[in-house]
C-alpha cells in the first residue's frame, strides 16, 4: 500500500493511535456487509475474527472495541476474584488501564522486574504462590509484546516460549498483551503465531500500527472465546452492525502489516539523530520497533518546554508519564503509517532547532 500523506502541516509523533483511515479502509466501511453481531449474524465480523485467529495460530477470535477491553475481558475470563496475576512491573495492563484488574476482575497484581520487557522465567515460576490458605492463588501470567514503556522492545521468542512453558507446566493460563504483536514479529523475523505459540490467549490492536480507527481482537481456544463473549457482554461490549468497523481491520490485516518495517526504519533514523543532541540520553541500538523513549535533562529547558518548542515547529510529541518513583523526565515519540521519511527529516530539523544545534 502506498504511504499515506499527512492531512495537515503537523507531524504527529505522539502515538500510532493518531492515524487516519486509508481510502481503502473508508471504502470498506461504506461497503461492508453487516448483521447483528450479538446475534452472531455479522459476516464481516466473523471473517475478521477467523482471520485474526488464523494469524495467531488460535482456534477462534472475538472482536472488541479497544485494547483495554481486550485485556480486561481476558483477565476476567481467565481468573476468579481474589486471585493474583503475575505481570511485568511496567506493563500497560498494570499502569494504563484505570485499575480495572482490581475494579472489574477483583485480581491483585504481582509485578516482576524485567530486562526490556522480558521477565526471567525462573522469577515467574518462583512468583507462583504455594498452596496456602493465607495466600491468593496465582490465576494468570501476562506478557506484553512489544513492551510500550520499554520503548517498543520486542520480547524475544525464546523468552516468550520459556514463560509460556512455566504456565503450561504449572497449570496457569498465560495471556499475551500483543497490542503491537505484529511489530514484534517483524522486528524478530518470526511469524506472530510462532511468537505466541502455546499461549492461552492473545489480544492485539488494529488502532495502533495497523492504522484502523477502532478495534482490537482476542484470540484463543473455542471454549475460551465462548466464555469471553459472555464477559464482553457484561462489559457492555456487545456490538450490533459492527461490520462497518471490522471491515477496515480486514484491510489492515491484508495490507498494513508488511509495511510496519518502514515505521521501524523511520524510528531508527530519528533515534540516531536524537542521540547526538544535547540533553538527550538514548542508545539507538535499543530502538527495535516504532517507539522511541529517551531521557531528557537540561538546566535551561524541561520536557514541557521541549514539547512546546516542537509544537511551534509543527511536530507533536509527548512526555512519557512517570510510572516509577523518582524517574527522570522522558519523552516518547512514535512512528506510524501517517509519518513519511520527509516528516522524519522535518522532525529531526525541529529537534535540532529547539535544542539550538
Image (tube, rainbow, N blue to C red):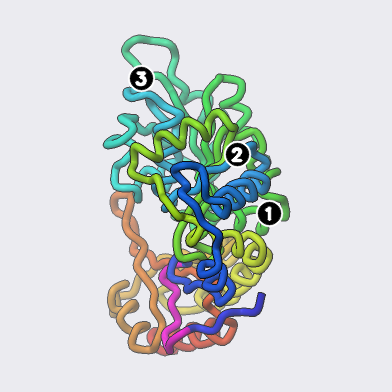
Question: Is residue 288 at all visible to an observer of this figure?
Answer: no
Name the disc covering residue 60, or none: 2
Return the residue nearer the eye: 253 or 325: 253
The residue positioned 64% from the left and 36% from the top of the image is 59
Residue 312 highlighted magenta (yes or no): no
Tell me: residue 315, above or below residue 143. Answer: below
The residue positioned 47% from the left and 79% from the top of the image is 277
Q: Magenta region, mostly helix, strand or loop?
A: loop
Name the disc covering residue 64, or none: none
**Regarding mark 1 in the picture, which secondary structure is present there?**
helix
Disc 3 target residue = 136
Question: Is residue 278 at all visible to an observer of this figure?
Answer: yes
Q: Which residues are magenta?
A: 7-15
- Residue 192 image point, x, y percent: 66, 49
Residue 10 highlighted magenta (yes or no): yes
Disc 1 target residue = 188
Return the residue nearer the eye: 155 or 302: 155
N-terminal-most mark, 2 or 3: 2
Q: CA distance from mark 1 to mark 2?
A: 25 Å
Amino acid at each position: 500500500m502506498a504511504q499515506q500523506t499527512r492531512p495537515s502541516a503537523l507531524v504527529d509523533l505522539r502515538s500510532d493511535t493518531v492515524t487516519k483511515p486509508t481510502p481503502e479502509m473508508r471504502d470498506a466501511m461504506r461497503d461492508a456487509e453487516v448483521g447483528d453481531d450479538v446475534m452472531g449474524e455479522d459476516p464481516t465480523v466473523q471473517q475478521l475474527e477467523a482471520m485474526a485467529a488464523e494469524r495467531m495460530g488460535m482456534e477462534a477470535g472475538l472482536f472488541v472495541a479497544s485494547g483495554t477491553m481486550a485485556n480486561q475481558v481476558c483477565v476476567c475470563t481467565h481468573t476468579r476474584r481474589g486471585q493474583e496475576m503475575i505481570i511485568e512491573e511496567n506493563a500497560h495492563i498494570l499502569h494504563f488501564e484505570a485499575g480495572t484488574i482490581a475494579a472489574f476482575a477483583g485480581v491483585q497484581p504481582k509485578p516482576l522486574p524485567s530486562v526490556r520487557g522480558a521477565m526471567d522465567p525462573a522469577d515467574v515460576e518462583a512468583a507462583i504462590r504455594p498452596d496456602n490458605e493465607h495466600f491468593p492463588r496465582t490465576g494468570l501470567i501476562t506478557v506484553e509484546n512489544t513492551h510500550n514503556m520499554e520503548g517498543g522492545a520486542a520480547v524475544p521468542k525464546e523468552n516468550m516460549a520459556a514463560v509460556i512453558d512455566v504456565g503450561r507446566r504449572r497449570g496457569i493460563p498465560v495471556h499475551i498483551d500483543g497490542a503491537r504483536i505484529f511489530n514484534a514479529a517483524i522486528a524478530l523475523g518470526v511469524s506472530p503465531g510462532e511468537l505466541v505459540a502455546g499461549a492461552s490467549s492473545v489480544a492485539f490492536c488494529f488502532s495502533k500500527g495497523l492504522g484502523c480507527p477502532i478495534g482490537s481482537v482476542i484470540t484463543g481456544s473455542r471454549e475460551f472465546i465462548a466464555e469471553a463473549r459472555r464477559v464482553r457482554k457484561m462489559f457492555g461490549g456487545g456490538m450490533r452492525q459492527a461490520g462497518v468497523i471490522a471491515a477496515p481491520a480486514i484491510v489492515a490485516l491484508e495490507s498494513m502489516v508488511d509495511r510496519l518495517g518502514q515505521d521501524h526504519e523511520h524510528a531508527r533514523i530519528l533515534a540516531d539523530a536524537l542521540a547526538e543532541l544535547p540533553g538527550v540520553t538514548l542508545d539507538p541500538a535499543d530502538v527495535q520497533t516504532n517507539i522511541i523513549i529517551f531521557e531528557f535533562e537540561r538546566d535551561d529547558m524541561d520536557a514541557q518546554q521541549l514539547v512546546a518548542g516542537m509544537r511551534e515547529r509543527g511536530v507533536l510529541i509527548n512526555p512519557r508519564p512517570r510510572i516509577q518513583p523518582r524517574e527522570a523526565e522522558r519523552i516518547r515519540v512514535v512512528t506510524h503509517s501517517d509519518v513519511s521519511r520527509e516528516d522524519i527529516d522535518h522532525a529531526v530539523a525541529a529537534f535540532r532547532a529547539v535544542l539550538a544545534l
